[in-house]
Every structure is written in C-alpha cells, then in structure tokens.
Image (tube, helix red, strand yellow):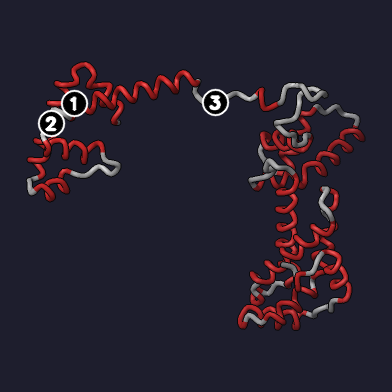
Amino acid sequence: MPPNGLGGRSLSRAAAQAELLDAETELRLARAWRDGRDEKSLHRLITAYLRLAISQAAKFRRYGISMNDLIQEASLGLMIAADKFDPDRGVRFSTYAVWWIRASIQDHILRSWSIVRTGSTGSQKSLFFNMRRVQARLEREVAASGQPLDRHQLRRQIAGELGVPLRDVEMMEGRLSGSDYSLNASQSGDHDGREWIETLEDTNPPQWREVERIKDNDALREWLQDAMAVLNERERFIVFERILSDRPRTLLSLGEELRLSKERVRQLEATAFAKMRRKLGTRAEDVHAFLT
C-alpha cells in the first residue's frame, strides 16, 4: 500500500507538502531503513520523493488509465525502490527510484490495456510504449522528404530503431489497432445473429469416436481378465505389480517380498506372459498396446 494507505489525491497533497532532502539526509534515512528497518525513516524517504512518482505517472496519462491509478502504481514502485536501494553504491535515490516507478506503472498499464496480455517479453514491452512515438516521427520525416515509404519498410525501420524483431513489430501493430471483443457477441447487428464463438473450431474428438474408444477399452479389459484367469495366484500377483499397478515394482522388490531371487521372479513373469499370449491369441498385440 502507498504511504499510510493514501489514495491518489491524498498522495498529491502529501507530495506538495513534502520536504526536499539533501544528499546527506537521504543517505542517513536509507541506511536507517536498510540496517535497522526504521519505518519512520522509510516513510520520510518515500514521502520526500512522491513528487518524482507523480511526475512520472503524468507521463503515462495517454494510455487511458486514470491519474489516481497511475499515482498509486507509481507510489508502489517508489516503495519497492526504497526497499531495494543500497545507499553505499554512491547513487542518489531519485536516480535509482525512477526505474522502479516506471516499471510499476508500465506493468499496470499492460495488465489493464487488454484482457489478452499485450507485452510478455522485453521487446514487446518496448514496442508497446515506444512504437507509436517512433512511427509518428518516421512518418513526419518521410512526409518532409517526399520519399515514398510503404508499411513494410516503415515496420522494418521501427524494428531497427528499437532493436526488436520485425515479427514483434507486426504483432504489436495488430494488437494496438484492435480492441477486445466478447466471443458471445453477435456477428450481425441483431440479437439473432450467429455468435463469434460458433466460428471457432472444436478441437475435441467427435462424439462417435469417444463412444468407440470406450467400447474398445471395455472389450480390452474383458480380454485381459480372461487372460489373467489362466494364471496361478503368484503369477497374477507378479503381473499385476509389474504392469497393472499405478506404481510398477521392480523385480528386486518383488523378489524380496516373495523370498525369491530376482532371476526367479523374471522367469515367473516370462511364464505368465507366455500363458496370457496363448490365451489371447491374435488379441495379444491389442491388449499390449492398451497396457502401454
């Protein structure tokens, strides 16, 4: 939470009344928080730099997020910066805090921009916040020079300037030019129109195929039960523990339980499988596939 749980407007008023810290006082407060977790020092340090947080928040107003929300996110970034700041690095707190403030604001904008995540990589995040600015400048330069420039060439120049892959530029251009729509929205203007969700391909198997699969599995289970019936009690136990159990056991562990050697258990297993194959006949391969 922001200092004292303040909202955006209250934060603005607190920032207007905050003291200006000199380098020595800032260093002392930062060390008091880092070394002694002195909350009064932390509060004083954060409050002194609320102006910085609010000024950074104001730079992102064009993304359609309320100023109060932006200020709240900026103050959260400021608090993270204060918690991570190392006063012995020789860097002023304001220089360090700017990065965390901007990161907090940008993450909030990306989460709020669309129900579909817009930027999940560094290059996509850079494009989201810089592509329109770079594109507008390039278009002005092209218009001033009088030289023709198609959309593909423009995308290539944007990719080059921002150091991102061309495919990311193309993807972000499509995302920024569109909006989110409900899949239950009608394709036509009336209420009786077909919904967009009806146009999506159903990746589930056809119902008739699922029925066939269930019937086949039932038949395979019956065949397996018939094959197991020809085994004696010890052979059934070994087969079950080796291939039918949720956690198949080793020959060694079965040998220890049955007081047999590992080799003897393997021989009994082989004998049991041979009996089952004779009983199953041509169905043996189908049952083997079912078990594996």
The quarter of the displayed image where residue 89 is located = bottom right
- Look at mark 2 in the image and give the residue it sits on: 231
Residue at 79% over, 58% down: 69
Q: Is label 1 in contact with label 2 (beta carbons under 8 Å)?
A: yes
Q: Is label 1 in contact with label 3 (beta carbons under 8 Å)?
A: no
Q: Which amino acid does label 1 sit on?
A: Ala
Please indicate whether residue 217 sits to the left or right of residue 31 in the image.
left
Tell me where residue 35 appears, x and y as whole percent. Answer: 61, 81
Q: Is label 2 in contact with label 3 (beta carbons under 8 Å)?
A: no
Tag 3 secondary structure:
loop
Residue ranking furthest to the top: 282
User: Dividing the image into 4 quarters, which one contains the C terminus?
Assistant: top left
- Crowding near pointer 3: few (<14 within 10 Å), some, many (20+)? few
Tell me where residue 26 appears, x and y as whole percent. Answer: 74, 79
Mark before the other along the chain sequence, 1 or 3: 3
Tell me where residue 121 appears, x and y as whole percent. Answer: 64, 46
Gap between marks 1 and 3, in whole Å?
A: 37 Å
Q: 74 or 180, which lies in front?
A: 180
- Look at mark 3 in the image and give the residue it sits on: 203
- Crowding near pointer 1: few (<14 within 10 Å), some, many (20+)? many
Looking at the picture, does residue 60 appear above or below residue 179?
below
Instruction: Report the mark closest to the observer, 1 or 3.
Output: 1
Gap between marks 2 and 3, in whole Å?
A: 43 Å
Q: Which amino acid does label 3 sit on?
A: Thr
Q: 242 or 81, which lies in front?
A: 242
Please indicate whether residue 292 sits to the left or right of residue 268 in the image.
right
Instruction: Report the mark closest to the observer, 2 or 3.
Output: 2
